[in-house]
Amino acid sequence: MKNETLYQYILCIADNSLILGQRLGELCGHGPSLETDIAITNIALDLIGQTRSYYQYAARLIDEEKTEDDIAFLRLEREYKNVLLVEQPNTHFGYVMARQFLFDVYHLMFLEKLQYSKDDQLVAVAKKGIKEVSYHKRFSSDWVKRLGDGTEESRQKMQEAVDDLWRFTNELFLMTDAEKTMAANGIGVDIAQLKEEYYKEVSDVLKEATLTVPENTYFTKGGKEGIHTEHMGYILSELQYMQRTYPNMTW
């Protein structure tokens, strides 16, 4: 039971990075400039790299014959535990940066706490990830400020993106049974305690970007329980295509 609970906990962490990495991968070659395009691609690679480390560990927990590929590619939609925020589409560049920023602030806070876990494997992934996610946060924060305090059009699009994505932020702090158990055992992070600091930091950046902090109190949830938006099926159809078309394929 302990292994199963830890396995489910790892999915709650790793699936966020997998799906967001896949989303960013869709933008390869489509950035507004070469430098920005490469930066977004590198962020996607960082996230997929973190995902691999988590899934390799998860595979060892449940079955010696399972691999990271089985976990990444051969689950059904309801078995993915990522938050709804990371599966939202690449509507426009401002939307991409707003989504990234709202996740990055949480992600860095989370990893900074996870590095003190009683689980050595999670500690190792967290410590490596902190360096990468610190850059991700600087990158997305800078773009939120540049676009928010830029032209009238860029400000309008960034505000539109923040307003639309805001309803997905509260789910970051809703804890599943696996998360509660792991936090109680000193292995996981009590993410509910990060909520106040998160909204303060996000709000400070939005105000600096001359953007309005949304006041709506309606929030959407479901991703952590496997109940996803209509976008998730399309993501998985691309992500899983090769493995499902050519089963047991190896390089």
Image (cartoon, rainbow, N blue to C red):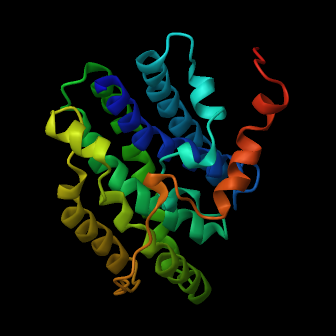
- Is 168 left, or right, of 115 in this rendering? right
* Residue 90 seen: yes
- The number of discs equals 0
Relative to 5, does residue 174 appear above or below in the rendering?
Answer: below
Q: Quadrant of residue 161?
A: bottom right
* Residue 35 seen: no
Residue shown at the point (19%, 40%) measured from the top left: 183
- Is 68 left, or right, of 120 in this rendering? right
For the residue pair 214 and 39, the one nearer the viewer reads as: 214
What x and y, as percent, mark residue 67? 57, 18
What x and y, as percent, mark residue 251? 76, 14
Residue shown at the point (48%, 47%) measured from the top left: 81
Residue shown at the point (30%, 74%) measured from the top left: 203
What x and y, as percent, mark residue 230? 66, 64
Quadrant of the rendering where the N terminus is positioned: top left
Relative to 98, does residue 76 appear above or below in the rendering?
Answer: above
Residue reaching furthest to the front: 1
Q: Quadrant of residue 4?
A: top left
Residue reaching furthest to the top: 64
Relative to 58, does residue 18 appear above or below in the rendering?
Answer: below
For the residue pair 219 and 101, the one nearer the viewer reads as: 219
Residue shown at the point (66%, 32%) measured from the top left: 74
What x and y, as percent, mark residue 36? 62, 53
